[in-house]
Image (cartoon, rainbow, N blue to C red):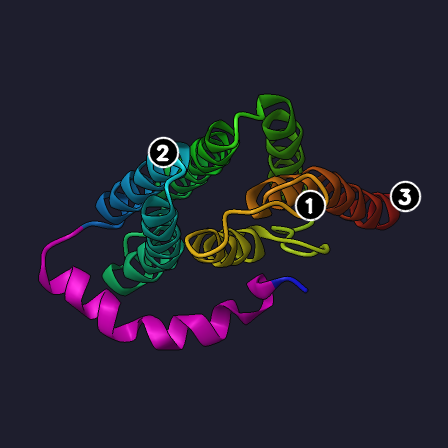
Amino acid sequence: MTLDQYRDTADKLLAPFVSAADTAGLSPNGVSVIAFGFAVAAGVAFGIADPLWYGLGALFVFLNGWLDLVDGALARKQGVSSKAGDMLDHVLDRYADIVVLVGLAAGIDSFALGLAAVTGVLMTSYLGTQIQAVGLGRAYGGLVGRADRLALIGIVGFASAFYTGTIGGFTLVGWLLVFFAIIGHFTALQRFWGAWSDLT
């Protein structure tokens, strides 16, 4: 399912945005920080849990995801790609994941479910970078990658702006966190097993 396999296609669509950022004098690190700012704004909006704010949170999540693509493309355009920039990007992405999921959990007052979702998401990302650390290249595979998560959060956020009821005892946001809690750990295990098979 992972949308990360379409990164090359997305890069082609980024050209106007990359050129605009470059013309505005932005650095890739600056774009990364702005992207993180949108993630924080999304977390706050989801924490408020009002229909209007759910819609705004969804918009902020999409902006975070789009700018997360722009920063890398901008670094390549400016010829300033570096390990330091890559590290900053990964660290901000993880904090972005945390603040968005905590905001979702706070909005429905279900921190235990939020914790389960956060650990699933962080383990998925950790396995991706750990696989890279052992020399197998960055892993984006598995059932649900970061691009998928952001798309799902955005879709559920917009849907929650119009439907605030429950289904089987959970709101739409509640079911999303259940999904992340289960599928996040499953994706992490998928990545682990694939890397383990390559290493042994």
SS at badge 2: helix
Residue denoted by label 1 = 179
Residue at 50%, 47% (x, y): give it: 164
Upstream in sequence: badge 3 or badge 2: 2
Residue denoted by label 2 = 48
Q: In which quarter of the image is the C terminus?
A: top right
Upstream in sequence: badge 2 or badge 1: 2
Compare residues 142 and 71 and report the one nearer the observer.
142
Upstream in sequence: badge 1 or badge 3: 1
Query: In the displayed image of the protein, which residue is found farthest to the top?
Result: 112
Q: Is 192 colored magenta in this rendering?
A: no
Q: What residue type is labelled 3?
A: Thr
x, y percentage for residue 134?
69, 39
The vertical placement of 77 against 133, above or below, is: below
Q: In which quarter of the image is the N terminus?
A: bottom right
In the rendered image, which quarter is residue 91 located in?
top left
Residue at 32%, 59% (x, y): give it: 70
**Magenta highlight range:** 3-26
SS at badge 3: loop
